[in-house]
Amino acid sequence: MDKVRVGIIGFGRMGLTHYSIINTHPAVEMTAIADTSSMMLNMIKKYLPNVKMFEDYKDLLKSGLVDAVIICTPSILHYEACKLAGENGIAVFCEKPFTTSPEQSLELANMFEQKGLVNQVGYVYRFDVVFNKVKEYLDQNLIGKVSHVNAQFLSATIQSTKPAKGWRSKRENGGGATYEMGSHVFDLMNFFIGKQQKVYGSLLNQVYSESVEDICSAEVQYADGITCSFHVNWSDYTYRKPMLKLDFHGTKGKIQADLYGLKVYLRDENKEHGIPEGWTTTPMNMLPDPTPYYVRGTSFTNQLYAFADAVKESRNTTGCSFRAASETQELIHTIFENNEKQ
Ligand SMILES: NC(=O)c1ccc[n+]([C@@H]2O[C@H](COP(=O)([O-])OP(=O)(O)OC[C@H]3O[C@@H](n4cnc5c(N)ncnc54)[C@H](O)[C@@H]3O)[C@@H](O)[C@H]2O)c1
């Protein structure tokens, strides 16, 4: 394939972000955009005369104009848009959370694998330079056998008691702190350690919201007896920007990582990797990052380029596959069910 013809479905906050990135990929030609907002389509069409605009995404998927689509609609619509794309032989990058049901996620994973179509979900932190360094250290067994992980994702997103409007105010649409933010940390644990085994307890709490949770806490077990305490709070006014923090406790040391860098504590020097005994701090800007284009950091660029490269080369993506995202979906729903039983 010389050029990958790409369409975007849902041209809101994420659609715009992804457009600005994918349009810089040398092998991509943007051919189509779909959004139900005619105001948005009218606003952008004068700047993109060669891109065909659709008010109904089904027409875009049946138009024959795209090899791949980026789906950025409200989460409740991901399933039906992905399914129709698959039926039309179109590769899909779908924003997170993948769907709003584990059954739908599994169905799509099976479908795209059977059809041999490239599939990826926007769990963008898999492309973060710091978290990739953490993954490398864990795979090298740098801190020995890991027994426990503390994973936190905190932000000041919801700070008002005014009744929320829009799709994010309802869980059935994919709203709430668990879907919107928790899904990212759950997926990161899947990336680092693998699929969860058991949810021992979960608590959802409200600070401001009326119909979704603002706080989600969960105790989850993974293979080899590894346990993880998750804490997600999107009403934490002490954070100006969202903060994702991870602490890994191992027999030979500890890793503390966040979006700005990582700290490693080793009980003994590791000569093989040149890391001394005690604490070693590595700020994010000391980690190599050759990403050519910066929009809201470099991870968004790296994940979309991984998708476009996979479509161009007809191979699996290095990002989060539909299969891996289905495992995260299962964890989200087990957390909801566990909380309902409390
Ligand atoms: N990866 C991340 O860090 C991240 C961050 C924010 C949002 N997201 C995800 O991205 C998705 C979109 O979020 P957003 O913040 O861009 O939302 P948004 O509300 O800003 O944009 C959604 C867009 O979809 C359009 N739309 C609604 N129904 C449609 C339909 N039937 N067909 C076509 N377009 C339709 C809306 O008009 C709007 O322009 C969600 O799934 C969200 O969870 C991911």
Image: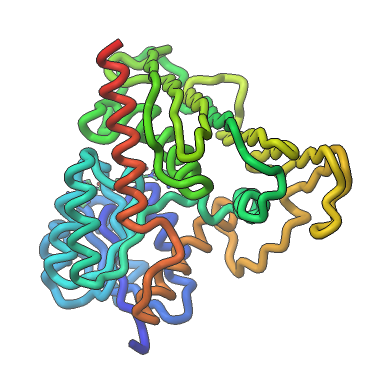
Would you say residue 44 is visible in this rendering? Answer: no
Front residue of this view, candidates 28 and 123: 123
**Residue at 35%, 20% in the rendered image:** 213
Front residue of this view, candidates 159 and 285: 285
Front residue of this view, candidates 45 and 127: 127
Q: Is 108 on the left-hand or right-hand side of 220?
A: left
Instruction: Specify the quadrant of the image occupied by residue 139.
Output: bottom right
Residue reaching furthest to the bottom: 2
**Residue at 20%, 59% in the rendered image:** 110
Could you say where residue 221 lies in the image, as x and y percent from the top left? 45, 31
Residue reaching furthest to the front: 224
**Residue at 44%, 38% in the rendered image:** 186
Count of number-bearing discs: 0
Instruction: Specify the quadrant of the image occupied by residue 17.
Output: bottom left
Could you say where residue 143 lies in the image, as x and y percent from the top left? 71, 43
The type of colouring in the image is: rainbow
**Residue at 34%, 35% in the rendered image:** 331
Would you say residue 99 is visible in this rendering? Answer: yes
Could you say where residue 80 lies in the image, as x and y percent from the top left? 14, 51
Q: Is 101 on the left-hand or right-hand side of 70?
A: left
